[in-house]
Image (cartoon, rainbow, N blue to C red):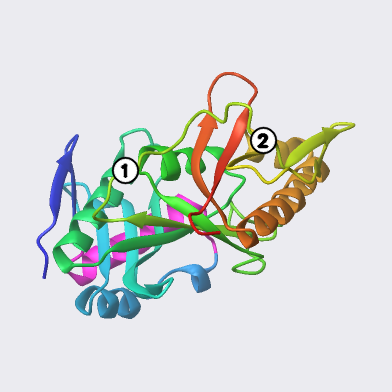
Amino acid sequence: MTNLRRVLDGVVLRRAESPADYRACQDAQRKAWGITEDGYIIPVATMVGANLHGGLVLGAFLADGTAVAMSFGFLGRIEGRVGLYSQLTGVVPGRQSLGLGREMKLLQREFARAEGLPVIAWAFDPLQSGNARFNLVKLGARVRRHVDDMYGPRTDALNAGVPTDRVIAEWEVFEDLKPLTDPGDAPSLIELHEGLPRVVSAPAADLLWLPIPHDVARLRRDAPETAEAWRKAVRQALGTAFSLGYEAVGFHRQADPRCGYILRRRAGT
């Protein structure tokens, strides 16, 4: 079993090893997502089985055994290749500025390299701009697949009342892909019409621009109808772009109003 261990500000990031570790990871999952229904919690037996047979369960543990972050992944087939599918990675409130999430992903990559797995994949909400920037710019992942309402209705604090549309990030383990951060004058797939997003037909260009809101959580709270219009528009635009052979290769999110994905046509399409 691959030996993984890092220490960050007194927090020890390592593989779960004992029943107490797995229960601590369950508690961290509850806190990170605001989960109140046990049906959403990964069973200890499932985590143990995955951890012992090609998957990976990581925890960020305090000295008393409390977990303040956790990650769960299992072996899967990703676009025809065997890789690590990271079902979830979460950090409890109050610990989210320490860089624990990034360290978890780097430990996953270290594990995948040691095991000869070429790719790590995971799902995320395409409207979450912070996650999108982290995944595509900080890590260098790519996105070429959208799944409509992937999990169905959820009741946890982060997903309650919103269809769970997701995109799949694919992270090449043995390559350092350079992300794009400047869309330049790439034609946009979405334009605003009377304050609401509308999908438009963009010309066939090497690069395309797909704007999203800076802060969809605030929009869902303050203007849920506008947030829902954005979800539908992004679903349509990404589905069309991916079917035409584009992939998301970068993200732009700065102080200026522009925020969104940079799409590039894949070679041979």
Q: Which residues are magenta?
A: 16-36
Looking at the rendering, in which quadrant would you find the C terminus?
bottom right
Dot 1, how many residues are within 10 Å of its Cα: few (below 14), some (14-19), or many (20+)?
A: some
Instruction: Please tell me whether residue 192 is drawn above or below residue 77 in the rendered image.
Output: above
Q: Amino acid at mark 1?
A: Arg
User: Which secondary structure class fits the magenta region best?
Assistant: helix
Q: Nearer the viewer, residue 156 or 186?
A: 186
What amino acid is found at the position of numbered circle 2 in the picture? Pro
Can I make out residue 15 in this image? no
Question: Is 8 or 241 nearer to us in this picture?
Answer: 241
Say if the magenta span includes residue 33: yes
Q: Which residue is mark 2?
A: 213
User: Where's residue 32, x and y in %?
Assistant: 44, 51
Residue 147 position in % (x across, y down): 61, 65
Q: Is residue 26 visible?
A: yes
**Residue for badge 1:** 102
Image quarter hosting the N terminus: bottom left
SS at mark 1? helix
Q: Secondary structure at mark 2?
A: loop
Q: Badge 2: few (under 14), some or many (20 or more) residues near its Cα, within 10 Å?
A: many
> As rendered, which of 97 and 117 lies closer to the eye?
117
Query: Which residue is found at the position 31% from the left and 43% from the top?
Result: 102
Residue 246 lies, in percent from the top left, at: 57, 53
Q: Is residue 183 left or right of residue 236?
A: left
Q: Is residue 128 magenta?
A: no
* Disc on the earlier residue, 1 or 2: 1
**Is 214 on the left-hand or right-hand side of 23?**
right
